């Protein structure tokens, strides 16, 4: 039996011409990297952790089940550098979060965070850092919950050199960040380099704006295809999730 289709409804995924063109350009650039290297074009190397997400200050009126009530949720966290520069060099940091059961139809939910500013405008601008996840990271591109625009933020709590805890915060309609819980890294695991896709594995109660889908989905699709093809031709095994 085939698995349920957890993609957003077609009516929510109609691309606009500018975002479709930008998505095609991004797909071309990332596809060339994938073809050349035989690996994921971004975030190819990282560290993977078994973790727990603790929701302490829920938002019951938002319509997102994960955030409706207090609770502790097992999850997986992957910390990585976008381009893969050596440790200590400038790069865009990334943190990927996978929460089993928090997605559509009981599937997993993926959330992707990148190092940015935290202000009303700077949260939409990537920020190069020397250490992958020692500065605030946001979801960068917005999502929606009902009529509200939603952005998420994680920022190190405690030790900023080797953080094991991150505060999780939410911003509604471009407003101030409100802390809602903590992510605690428990045990490091072998890095499987699994692919995280916040559009396919969408958080239940949220909807991705059509222009965001048009921008991201072509890049994800072509990067996967070309990296798999290149790996097959060179005899290399693709990373898990590719």
Image: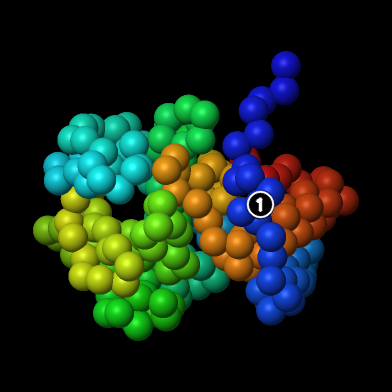
Whether residue 37 is situated above or below residue 73 in the rendered picture = below
Query: Residue 10, percent across and down?
Result: 68, 49
Q: Is residue 9 above or below residue 116?
A: above
Residue 161: horizontal and vertical position, in percent? 21, 65
Q: Position of residue 3 (x, y in %)?
A: 66, 25
For the N terminus, the image quarter is top right
Q: Residue furthest top?
A: 1
The answer to whether residue 76 is left or right of residue 34 is left
Where is residue 76, by image quadrant?
top left
Mark 1 packing: few (<14 Cα in 10 Å), some, or many (20+)?
few
> Left or right of 149: which side holds 37?
right
Residue shown at 52%/29% (left/top)? 105
Residue 57's place in the image compared with 167, above or below, is above
Circle 1 sits on which residue?
11
Residue drawn 29% across the image and 63% down it:
172
Q: Secondary structure at mark 1?
A: helix
Give the colour scheme shown.
rainbow
Nearest the eye: 221 or 8: 8
């Amino acid at each position: 039996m085939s698995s349920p289709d957890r993609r957003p409804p077609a009516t929510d995924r109609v691309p606009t011409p500018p975002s479709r063109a930008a998505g095609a350009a991004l797909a071309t650039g990332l596809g060339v990297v994938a073809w050349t290297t035989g690996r994921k074009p971004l975030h190819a190397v990282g560290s993977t952790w078994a973790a727990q997400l603790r929701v302490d200050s829920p938002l019951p009126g938002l319509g997102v089940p994960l955030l409706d009530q207090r609770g502790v949720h097992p999850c997986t966290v992957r910390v990585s550098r976008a381009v893969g520069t050596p440790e200590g060099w400038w790069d865009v940091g990334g943190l990927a979060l996978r929460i089993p059961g928090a997605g559509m139809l009981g599937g997993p939910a993926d959330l992707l965070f990148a190092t940015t500013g935290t202000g009303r405008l700077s949260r939409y601008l990537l920020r190069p850092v020397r250490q992958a996840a020692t500065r605030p990271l946001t979801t960068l591109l917005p999502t929606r919950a009902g009529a509200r625009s939603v952005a998420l933020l994680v920022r190190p709590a405690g030790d900023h050199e080797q953080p094991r805890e991150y505060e999780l915060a939410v911003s509604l309609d471009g407003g101030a960040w409100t802390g809602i819980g903590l992510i605690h890294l428990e045990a490091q695991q072998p890095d499987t380099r699994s692919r995280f896709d916040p559009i396919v594995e969408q958080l239940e109660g949220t909807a991705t704006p059509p222009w965001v889908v048009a921008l991201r989905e072509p890049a994800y699709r072509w990067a996967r295809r070309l990296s798999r093809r290149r790996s097959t031709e060179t005899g290399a095994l693709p990373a898990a999730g590719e």
